[in-house]
Amino acid sequence: MPLSITPGLRQMALAAVYFSMMGLLVRLVPTLPAMEVVVFRTLISFCMSGFMLWYAGRSWVGKNRRLLMLRGLTGFLGLSIYIYCIQVMTLAEAVTLQYLNPIFSSMLAPWFLKEQARRREWVAILVAFSGVVLIANPTASGHWPVAFLGVLGAMCSGVSYNVVRKLGLQGEDPHVIVLYFPFIALVLASPFAAAHWVAPLGWQWLILLGIGVTTQLGQISMSRGLALERISRATVVNYVVIFLSTIFSFLIGDTISPSSLAGMGLILVALLIVSLRVPSKSPQSHQ
């Protein structure tokens, strides 16, 4: 069965590469509080999006402010939980739990976007969920509460992805969609960051800059990808991050349990299942 790689899937794969790089960089600054990392990440992204809109002579306001605010709020919650999990779990485990979001994206899509997930995509989602159970390892003392928090963050991201796709279908500028996310996050995260501020040291400033830049590039690619491809298929491509993050985990010396490796393998199988779909003749599949 041939691979069906649409322009939307290519954009989502590119976003996955950027986000995996961001996750690695976050793991390299474990001494900085999660909210402080959120502030730096979103400040850089906000400045980059604002500059691009100013340079292009486009409005910062957007067409649907209510949805843009919802995107910012759910994005902030998902991001904050994700960064916390990266700092307290292995990189591969935290990233894998975060990228459970296709399940929630597909569950919400019929209500939010009037899009139904296809049988093959639901199979992929169930296989991926089995992988997450292996990674969460609920029998391990002290592991399941953090794993549950990671799943909650994935749920927030699933809502956010639905909002991003809806805004894209309405013709919203990708830079405007991205702009509202750091704007909301800066407002909400700054008081917490200020209360527990830790001054970054020399090389940490460069890492924080890298976190912001990779975030911006990933957000733009993701916004474009979700505007071009149905959400239940597009978000499963995010699982390429699992493969890259596992490699990064080994490189930085993380110890990964056999059950976690098995779970990551199942999630990669899920990605293969959704990618080997026969291209649909329906024009909806390339919206």
Image: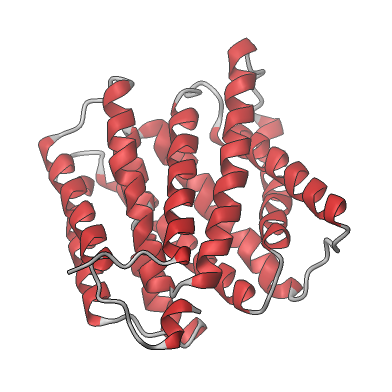
**Eyeballing the image, is 208 above or below 19?**
above
How many discs appear? Answer: 0
Q: Quadrant of residue 69?
A: bottom right
- Residue 230, image x, y percentages: 44, 75
Drawn side of residue 231 relative to residue 185, left or right: left
| Res 89 visible | yes
Residue 134 or 51: which is nearer the viewer? 51
Q: Quadrant of the N terminus?
A: bottom left
**Which x, y percent locates residue 36?**
63, 33
Q: For the point 19% across and 72% down, which residue is it?
A: 123
Pick the residue in front: 19 or 89: 19
In the rendered view, would you say 59 is above or below 167?
Answer: above
Q: Residue at x 70, y 71 (%)?
A: 172
Question: In the shown orientation, is residue 113 left or right of residue 268?
Answer: right
Residue 93: image x %, image y %? 29, 41
Q: Residue at x 51, y 71 (%)?
A: 228
**How is the structure coloured here?**
secondary structure
Could you tell me which residue is drawn at 19 percent across and 39 percent down? 141
Q: Position of residue 249 (x, y in %)?
A: 30, 29
Residue 76 seen in render:
no
Point out the residue furthest to the front here.
2
For this orientation, the residue located farthest to the top is 202
- Relative height, residue 180 to residue 264 (above, below): below
